[in-house]
Amino acid sequence: MSKVDVYLAKQSLLSKANYQFWKAMTTGTTRIITRMHVEGRENVPKTGSFVLAPIHRSYIDTPISAVVTSRRLRYMAKDSMWKKPWFGWLISSVGGFPVSRGTTDIEALKRCFLLLDQGEPIVMFPEGERKSGPIVQPLFEGAAYVAARGKVPIIPVGIGGSEMVMPRGAKFIHPHKVRVIVGKPIHPVIPENGRALRSEVKRLTAELHDELQRLFDEAEAGLPAKRRRR
């Protein structure tokens, strides 16, 4: 059994109760702080695997994304978060797995495909690290590649107001209204030979970028004027 297989086997031994406990704790607190309003939950598949692709403006986007579905989500996270064993254990216990930022992490990709093969959904922030401002930055192609190679849909998510809750560099959380809009699934076009073509990954990335910008704009526009990011 490979290291990846062992890692995922260990993850599967974690009880659903453990995940639901930590999810309830984090999302419950997030709901109180943000008075969150979520639209489009019906766009999240109730069965089967998919890639959830949210906008990324704050650390709090991670618990926010968990609110859109009752299913367990798997998160890619920067490997430096595993430097403290207790914190790494906590992240792993709720479905997180490490990725080396800025590199082609083959092991992380293998984990993604194994999880998708098992019917589990994963979360990938296509902008990479947290960004700032009203413009969706050029996307990394990882989310599109994983979706195309795994033959699963991408679910785009616009999150308005999270940057005001905890912007880059902030040490504390500030209560602010957040609005979340889940878009319709974006399905990759897979050729008959089943291979993910480079051109399809680029097309999928471009479509995802446009849809994220639309959802982000809509989510921000639905916030009270004094709560919008400036």
Image (cartoon, helix red, strand yellow):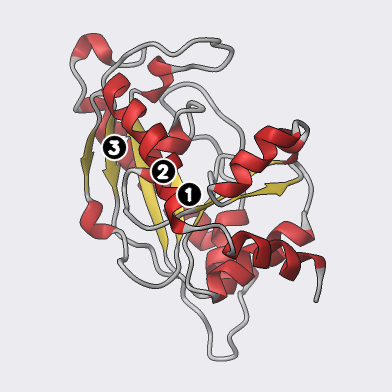
For the residues carrying marks 1 and 3, which lies nearer the camera in this image?
1
Q: Residues within 10 Å of mark 2 (few under 14, many from 20)?
A: few
**Front residue of this view, candidates 118 and 181:** 118
Q: Determine the CA span between mark 3 and mark 2.
A: 23 Å
- Quadrant of res 8: bottom right
Q: Mark 1 near mark 2, Cβ–Cβ under 8 Å?
A: yes
Q: Is residue 105 left or right of residue 57?
A: right
User: The residue tagged with tag 1: helix, strand or loop?
Assistant: helix
**Front residue of this view, candidates 14 and 42:** 14
Query: Does residue 2 sit above or below 51 in this rendering?
Result: below
Residue 30's label in the rendered image is none
Q: Position of residue 22 (x, y in %)?
A: 45, 40
User: The residue tagged with tag 3: helix, strand or loop?
Assistant: strand
User: Which residue is tagged 1?
Assistant: 18
Q: Is residue 115 left or right of residue 4?
A: left
Q: Amino acid at mark 2?
A: Phe
User: The residue tagged with tag 2: helix, strand or loop?
Assistant: helix
Q: Amino acid at mark 1?
A: Asn
- At 51% from the left edge and 75% from the top edge, which residue is drawn? 151
Q: Position of residue 75 (x, y in %)?
A: 56, 49
User: Which residue is tagged 3?
Assistant: 180
User: Which residue is tagged 2?
Assistant: 21
Q: Determine the CA span between mark 1 and mark 3.
A: 26 Å
Query: Does residue 10 sit above or below 57 in this rendering?
Result: below
Query: Does residue 205 sit above or below 58 in this rendering?
Result: below
Q: Amino acid at mark 3?
A: Val
- At 48% from the left edge and 66% from the top edge, which residue is drawn? 120
